[in-house]
Amino acid sequence: MPRKKDCANNQTAYFSGHYEHYGVNCLGICDVEGRYLFFCVASPGKTNDALSFVNAGCHEILRDMPAGTYFVGDAAFELSEKLITPFTGSQRANPSRDLYE
């Protein structure tokens, strides 16, 4: 959590142009039952989700997960062998991407 002295000369770092508000980027990891396993205030609101993921150390959690377990993230994150993300934009138009094999 940022302290007042961290924000004193750095207010713009907390302004999200996307949401047009000041804030912080929070990240949470839940299990399939919706229970939080990890939560943190990762970075100022202007920071993109992918960078906040790294700053919070979530990439290390991902790396150390046992085989056969996965994160499910939104399109802000980069697809990897252990991080599943949705198809976006024109990628969704391809019918072959609707198959689960």
Image (spheres, rainbow, N blue to C red):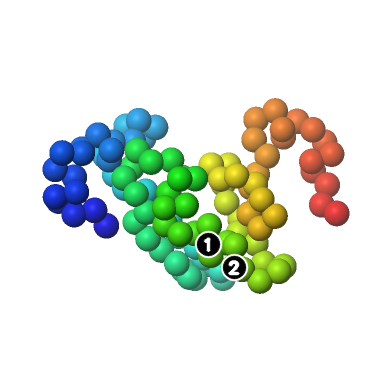
Q: Is residue 70 left or right of residue 49?
A: right
Identify the residue at image location x=24%, y=53%: 2
Looking at the image, residue 15 sits to the left or right of residue 47; the answer is left
- Residue 25, numbered circle: none
In this orientation, does residue 68 appear?
yes
In the picture provided, is 27 more to the left or to the right than 15?
Answer: right
Counting from the top left corner in percent of width and height, residue 77 is at 56, 45
In the foreground, 7 or 22 = 7
Vertical order, 46 against 53 (above or below): above
Calculate the distance from the C-alpha at mark 2 to the C-alpha at mark 1: 6 Å
Residue 29 image point, x, y percent: 50, 63
Tell me which amino acid carries mark 2: Asp
Asked which quadrant contains residue 93, the reply is top right
Task: Check disc 2: other Cα within 10 Å, few if <14, some if 14-19, many if 20+.
Answer: few
Between 71 and 9, the one lying in front of the other is: 9
Residue at coordinates 53% horizontally, 65% vertically from top-left? 61
| Callout 1 amino acid | Glu
Between 34 and 82, the residue placed more toward the observer is 82
Q: Could you tell me which residue is drawn at 28 percent across and 38 percent down?
A: 13
Q: The N terminus is located in which quarter?
A: bottom left
**Residue reaching furthest top?**
90
Name the one closer to the observer, 38 or 96: 38
Query: Dot 2: what SS?
Result: loop
- Residue assigned mark 1: 60
Q: Give the label on residue 64, or none.
A: 2
Verify CB contact (< 8 Å) between mark 2 and mark 1.
yes
Q: Indicate the quadrant containing the C terminus: top left, top right, bottom left or bottom right.
A: bottom right
> Element at badge 1?
helix
78 above or below 64?
above
| Residue 26 visible in the current orientation | no
- Residue 82 percent coordinates (x, y): 66, 58
